């Protein structure tokens, strides 16, 4: 019995016999289910951040470079997974995260008016290069090098935001829900990537995500109380 590429026959067969499914049967099934759960959750993961910015009409405390690098990282990661032919459950969230990340950057640009010529150059270069990368129309060796670099890109996408939070002793308009879902998604993705026998580099990317997203989530929790007390005092 197969539904959406998930084989339930092994598990159902064991349950019909009154037995608990064995590990070799249960883990791949759990991996698939969690993979699709991540894909489903990814459709709204950045919505809390977008809504918070629009609600307050502010991008206070947000690092523009961090969100721009995030778009670049998602683009490379998605292109690589498509090129490797991995199952959709192993990378599907990247497509939805990329779309939301682009919308988020556009909103940040809007609230960063006026925008100078230098600021426009970055999105123009991205629009010119991204289609070629997503189509996989580049040298395989260069593709591997790009994917290897995307781990550094994601790492350095978080560093400016982490540093800005530390300097300001505040996380500004960062969304707790978005950061929580990013952290949880990275943890689950390590498990699913191992089960799907994804390349080590894919697993490494998820581990980096746990560390960096976890750091930002910790900062939001750490700085939220002092910030709330400060705002209450000002009132």
Image: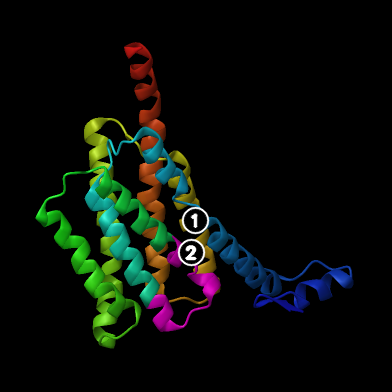
Q: In this view, does 218 lie to the left or right of 149?
A: right
Look at the image and tell me in which quarter the C terminus lies.
top left
Front-lying residue, 49 or 206: 49
Crowd class of label 1 (few under 14; some 14 to 19; many from 20; radius 10 Å): many
Residue 184 pos. (x, y %): 50, 51
**Mark 1, secondary structure of its residue:** helix
Query: Where residue 42 sits: x, y (%)?
Result: 50, 58
Kindly identify the residue that appears in the image at 54 percent across and 60 percent down.
38
Q: Name the residue tied to disc 1.
A: 185
Q: Earlier in the sequence, mark 1 or mark 2?
A: 2
Q: Nearer the viewer, residue 74 or 21?
A: 74
**For the point 57% across and 66% down, which residue is it?**
35
- Image quarter in which the N terminus is found: bottom right
Residue in the foreground of this view, choosing between 106 and 232: 106
Point 34% across, 77% down: residue = 134
What span is colored magenta in the figure?
80-96
Check if mark 1's residue and mark 2's residue have beta carbons within 8 Å: yes
Q: Does the magenta stretch include residue 89?
A: yes
Q: Which picture quadrant has residue 31?
A: bottom right
Q: Which mark is residue 83?
A: none
Which secondary structure, mark 2?
A: helix
Which one is closest to the eye, mark 1 or mark 2?
2
Q: Distance between the residues labelled 1 and 2?
A: 9 Å
Name the residue located 16 percent from the left edge and 44 percent from the top edge. Answer: 114
Q: Main secondary structure of the magenta part?
A: helix
Q: Which mark is on residue 93? A: 2
- Residue 134 part of the magenta-drawn span: no
Q: Is residue 91 left or right of residue 73?
A: right
Q: Residues within 10 Å of mark 2 (few under 14, many from 20)?
A: many
Q: State the image coordinates of residue 125 (x, y, percent, origin top left).
A: 19, 68
């Amino acid at each position: 019995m197969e539904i959406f590429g998930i084989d339930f026959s092994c598990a159902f067969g064991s349950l019909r016999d009154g037995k608990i499914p064995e590990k070799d049967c249960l883990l791949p099934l759990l991996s698939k289910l969690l993979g699709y759960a991540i894909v489903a959750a990814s459709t709204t993961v950045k919505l809390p951040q977008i809504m918070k910015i629009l609600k307050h009409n502010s991008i206070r405390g947000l690092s523009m470079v961090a969100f721009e690098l995030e778009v670049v990282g998602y683009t490379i990661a998605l292109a690589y997974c498509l090129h490797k032919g991995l199952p959709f459950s192993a990378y599907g969230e990247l497509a939805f995260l990329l779309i939301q990340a682009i919308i988020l950057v556009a909103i940040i640009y809007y609230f960063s008016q006026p925008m100078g010529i230098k600021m426009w150059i970055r999105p123009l270069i991205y629009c010119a290069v991204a289609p070629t990368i997503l189509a996989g129309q580049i040298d395989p060796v260069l593709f591997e090098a790009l994917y290897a670099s995307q781990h550094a890109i994601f790492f350095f996408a978080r560093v400016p935001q982490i540093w800005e939070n530390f300097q300001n002793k505040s996380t500004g308009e960062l969304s707790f829900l978005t950061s929580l879902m990013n952290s949880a998604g990275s943890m689950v993705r390590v498990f699913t990537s191992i089960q799907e026998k994804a390349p080590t580099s894919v697993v490494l990317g998820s581990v980096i995500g746990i560390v960096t997203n976890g750091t930002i989530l910790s900062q939001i929790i750490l700085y939220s109380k002092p910030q709330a007390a400060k705002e209450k005092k000002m009132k």
